[in-house]
Amino acid sequence: MPPGGAGAPRGASRRGLPARLRAAATTPPGRLRLLGAVLALLVVAFGAVTALEVTGRSHAAGDVVGRSQPLSADAAHIYRSLADADTAAASGFLAGAKEPADVRERYEEDIATAARLLVKAAANTDGSSASAAEITTLNEQLPRYTGLVEQARAANRQGLPLGGAYLRYANQRMTARLLPAAERLYEAETARLAEDEGHARAWPALSLAAGLLVLAALAWAQWRDHRRTNRILNPGLLAATAATAAALLWLAGAHTAARAGLGDARAHGQDSLKVLNEARIGSLKARANENLTLVARGAVLTDDGRSDKYATDYGAAMAGLDRALAEARRLADDAAGGDPVADAARWTGEWRTRHTAARHTDEAGDYDGALRQVIGGEASTGAAFDRVDAALRKALDHEQGEFTRAAGRARDALSGLPEGAAALTVLGAVGVVAGVNRRLAEYR
C-alpha cells in the first residue's frame, strides 16, 4: 500500500468539500439553490421577528385593559373610599349619640371597600415595588385610624368632649398618613399604566424593516429571474411576495388601529378619569373639612394662628374642585359625559351658597341652627354634597366605559396577528421553495 494510502482519500475528500461547495455556488443551479435558501430564511426570519414583537405589544395592550388601568382605578377608589370614610365619620359624629344608620353604613362600607381593594392590589403587585411599600403603609395605618374613630364615637355617645379630640386626631392620621400613601399608590399604578400604554403604542420598527427588506429581496429575485429567462412571472416567488406583503400590511394596519384606539382611550377616557377623580377627591376633602369646622369649633388654627384650619382647608378644597370641574367640562366630548359634570358644577355652587349661610349662622352663635344647615334635610350642605358626589360618580362611570371600549379596540386590533403573520410567512417560504424548484427542474 502506498504511504498514506489509507488516509489519502479521506484527506482529499476533506480538502475537496469546500472546493465542491465553491464550485456548486458558481454554477447556475448552485447559485439558484443558495438564493432560494437565503430567501426562505429571510421570509421565516421576518415572521419570527413579527410574532415576537407583536406578541409583546399585544400583551401590553391586554395589560392596559385588564391589569394596569383597573389597578390604577382601584388605587383611585381606595383614595376616594378613605376620604369618604373620613367624611362619614365626621358627619356621624356631628349627629351626636344617635348616629344615623345610613351614615354608619356608609362609613363601614368605605372601610371595607378600601380593605378589599388593598388585598387585591397586594395580590397584583411585585413585593419589591413602590406600590407594595404604600400598600404596607395603608394596611398598617388603617386599623389605627378606625380605632381612633371608634374611641371618638364611644366618647361622643357618653357626651364627653374628648370625643372631638379623638376625631381630630383620626382626621390628622387620615390626612397625614393614609391619604398621602393612597395618593402615592395611585401615582405608582398610573405610572405603570403609562408604561404599558407606551410599550403597546411603540412601532414594531424591526418587524417593519424586516418586511421591507424581504419584499425588496423577493422583488430583486423575480427581476433576476425575468432577466435570465425572459419569463414575466414566477408563480412561487409571486405567491411568496403576496404572502409577505399581506403580513406587512396586516402588521402596519393593525398597529395603526391599536395606536388609534389607545390614543382615544387616553384622550377620551384616561385624561377625563384623572380629572374627575381629582374633582371627587376635592369634594370629599371639602365635605370632611366642613364637618370638622363644626366639630373643632375654632379649636384648630392654621400655622400662622390667624384662621380656622378646617375652614381654610375647606376653601382650598373647593377651589380645587372648581378647577377640576372646569377641566372635566373641557375634556367631555359628548352629552353623556358633559351633562353630569355640568350638574356637579351647578350643585357645587349651591353647596357653596348653603355653606356660607351655615357659617353666618354659626358665627352668630346659633350652633344648633348651623348644624341643621350642614347635616339636616334637603336644604342642607350635606344634601348638596350628595348631589355633587352622585353626578361625579355618573361621569366617572361613563368615562370608565369610554376608556374600556377604546382600549379594548386596541387590544382586539392586535389579536391573531402573531399567529397570522407566522402562518403567512411560512406560506411565503413554501412559495420561495416551490418557485426555486421549478427553475431547478429546467436544469435536469
Image (cartoon, grey):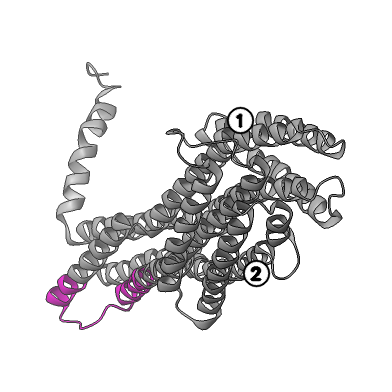
* Residue sitting nearer the eye, 124 or 420: 124
Q: Measure how far apart labels 2 and 1 are at the Cα level.
A: 33 Å
What secondary structure do most residues of the magenta stretch adopt? Answer: helix
Q: Which image quadrant: the N terminus?
A: top left
Q: Report the amino acid beneath label 1.
A: Thr
**Is residue 443 visible to us here?**
yes
Mark nearer the viewer, 2 or 1? 2
81 sits to left or right of 239: right
* Residue sitting nearer the eye, 229 or 199: 199
The residue identified by callout 1 is 137
Circle on res. 79: none
Q: In which quarter of the view is residue 40 placed?
A: bottom left
- Dot 2 lies on which element? helix
Q: Is residue 16 above or below residue 242?
A: above
**Is residue 78 visible to us here?**
no
Q: What stretch is highlighted in magenta?
A: 222-249
Circle on res. 387: 2
- Dot 1 lies on which element? helix
Please provide percent x and percent y for residue 220: 17, 68
Which is more N-terminal, label 1 or label 2? 1
151 sits to left or right of 43: right
Please provide percent x and percent y for residue 60: 48, 54
Q: In which quarter of the view is residue 256 placed?
A: bottom left
Q: In this view, does 313 lie above or below 333?
A: above
The residue positioned 70% from the left and 40% from the top of the image is: 119
Residue 55: within the magenta? Answer: no
